[in-house]
């Protein structure tokens, strides 16, 4: 393995460790905030926080609205660390790495859909207790651009894998 490959595998290992440590810290923070401070910090909606502070709203429903995106986040972190694990082993263009990368793309798409459902669900539930509810959907152009770039990278990785296979056949 040449020195550039060794650097890439070492960097991948460091980033994998950072992803794992960051995931553990995030999980600890979320659990701590929920059980000690009676707050849920993953939600960004003002409607959610108004409902959370309202004695009439059911917190079980609010948690149910938040749970799918939280689960998607941790599944995404799992696939990211798994991808970095393959990179750490020097398997940059293998089927396993591509499989992990495609999971990350689909999870990003799913997260956008879940965010829309979460916003709608929270607004509809908020409307039951408050009169000033305005239902709106926020489509983040940055997320859509990220998905398009991820698809382009997946295409480039596939092309690089095919070129690598042709080069091995030629030699």
Image (spheres, helix red, strand yellow):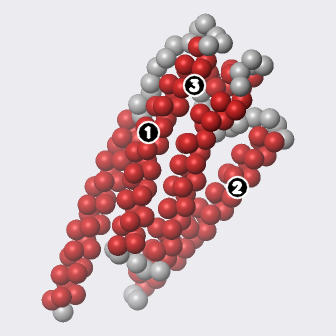
Q: Earlier in the sequence, mark 1 or mark 2?
A: 2
Distance CA(mark 2)–CA(mark 3): 27 Å
Residue 84: give x, y in percent of width and height.
Answer: 49, 69
Element at badge 2?
A: helix
Residue 74 percent across, percent down from the top left: 58, 53
Q: Residue furthest right?
A: 36
Q: Nearer the viewer, residue 144 or 108?
A: 108
Badge 1 marks a residue whose secondary structure is helix
**Mark 3, residue position:** 122
What number is the disc on residue 25?
2
| Distance between mark 1 and mark 2 Cα atoms | 24 Å
Helix, strand or loop at label 3? It is helix
Which of the marked residues, 2 or 3, is nearer the chain's N terminus?
A: 2
Task: Name the side, left or right, on which 155 lies relative to 1.
Answer: left
Q: Quadrant of residue 17?
A: bottom right
Where does label 1 land, which residue? 112
Where residue 153 appears, x then y in whole percent? 31, 59
Image mark count: 3
Q: Earlier in the sequence, mark 1 or mark 3?
A: 1
CA–CA distance in space, label 1 to label 3: 15 Å
**Residues packed near mark 1 inside 10 Å, few (<14), some (14 to 19) or many (20 plus):** some
Which residue is nearer to you in this view: 169 or 130?
A: 130
* Whether label 2 touches label 3, CB < 8 Å: no
């Amino acid at each position: 393995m040449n020195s550039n490959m060794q650097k890439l595998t070492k960097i991948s290992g460091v980033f994998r460790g950072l992803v794992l440590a960051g995931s553990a810290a995030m999980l600890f923070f979320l659990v701590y905030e929920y059980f000690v401070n009676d707050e849920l910090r993953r939600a960004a909606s003002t409607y959610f926080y108004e409902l959370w502070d309202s004695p009439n709203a059911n917190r079980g429903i609010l948690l149910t609205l938040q749970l799918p995106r939280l689960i998607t986040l941790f599944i995404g972190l799992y696939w990211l660390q798994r991808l970095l694990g393959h990179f750490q082993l020097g398997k940059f263009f293998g089927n396993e790495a591509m499989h992990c990368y495609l999971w990350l793309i689909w999870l990003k798409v799913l997260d956008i859909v879940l965010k829309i459902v979460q916003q709608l669900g929270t607004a509809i539930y908020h409307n039951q207790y408050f009169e000033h509810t305005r239902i709106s959907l926020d489509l983040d152009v940055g997320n859509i651009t990220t998905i398009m770039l991820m698809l382009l990278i997946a295409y480039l990785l596939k092309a690089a894998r095919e070129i690598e296979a042709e080069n091995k056949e030629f030699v």
